[in-house]
Image (spheres, helix red, strand yellow):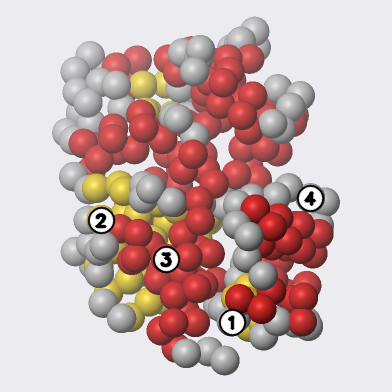
Amino acid sequence: MRIRATDPVTSLYGAFGKYLYDNKIELSDVAQVMLTGVGSAYIDKPVYGLPTTHAEEFLADGWGARFESELDRMMVVSMGTGTSIVRCDGGDIRHIGGIGIGGGTLTGLSRLLLKTDDVHQIASLATRGDISHINLLIGDISAKPLPGLPMDATASLFAAAQANASREDIALGLICMVLQAVGSAAILSALDSGIKDFVLIGNLTLLPQCKEVFPMMEQLYGVRFIIPKYSEYCTAIGAALCYEHYKIR
């Protein structure tokens, strides 16, 4: 369940209360509350008087992605406001870095260029866009494919954009820029590790353009991008698994 509010405390209590009510769960049925993510730092007392513990976010990312993907060795790419990358190798789960590009980049640039930060509207506009009106492709600068780079591969993001570009083309260009940047950073993070599986989690995985951008990157780089069924909730699932695994009480 997701609740949007102006601050993390309101979001937490609103989502938790609604979830209990909708699923007919009594407070007495709840053994433990697990909090994770940067917003959890605002909570320093038991939620609704229940035993409450914080789960380290990157561990939660790893445990949730492992559970949902049924893989033991992978890179977990958490696409939130920015993007963090966690390497899972059996029971060894560690944060190895990230980039400041993610959903926040998409909404911020969309506010400037499209006068909206509604992700649903941005994604809808993008479905009617033409990426060749925004990005410079290899085919635009070369008469034949370059080694390892087909004619439709991106040579330069936004390099073909004109001052009169349509909102639809701009929206698609912004989404592709963010997704390609995230995908490229993930692939580079796995160099020399032998890891070819990348599990994508977070709200950006819900963008329909993921089904176009990541398969193209799979073919280009010989890797596999996986979006689990409950990708947007993997970190929450991982927080619950942290309790089960470490028996946090």
Q: Give the image quarter of residue 36.
A: bottom right
Question: For the residues carrying marks 3 and 2, which lies nearer the camera in this image?
Answer: 3
Q: Judging from the image, what secondary structure is the residue with disc 3 in?
A: helix
Q: Could you tell me which residue is drawn at 74 percent across and 76 percent down? A: 47
State the residue position of label 2: 197
Task: Assess whether mark 4 and mark 1 are in contact (beta carbons under 8 angstroms).
Answer: no
Residue 64 is tagged as 3
Q: CA distance from mark 1 to mark 4?
A: 26 Å
Label 2 sits on a secondary structure element that is strand
Residue 74 position, x and y percent, is 28, 63
Q: Is residue 96 visible?
A: no
Please indicate whether residue 54 sits to the left or right of residue 156 in the image: right
Quick check: marks 3 and 2 in contact, CB under 8 Å? no
Q: Tell me, yes or no, whether the two marked residues, 1 and 3, touch with CB atoms within 8 Å.
A: no
Query: Rounded to the nearest whole Å, what is the CA distance between mark 2 and mark 4?
Result: 34 Å
Residue 135 seen in the current view: yes
Check disc 1 and report the residue beneath it: 31
* SS for callout 1: loop
**CA–CA distance between discs 1 and 2?**
35 Å
Q: CA distance from mark 3 to mark 4?
A: 24 Å
Mark 1 or mark 4, which has the lower sequence index? 4
Task: Say what secondary structure mark 4 lies in.
Answer: loop
Residue ID for mark 4? 5
Question: Could you tell me the amino acid type at mark 2?
Answer: Asp
Q: Earlier in the sequence, mark 2 or mark 4?
A: 4
Q: Count every numbered label the image shows and give the total.
A: 4
Q: Residues within 10 Å of mark 2 (few under 14, many from 20)?
A: many
User: What type is the residue that disc 1 sits on?
Assistant: Ala
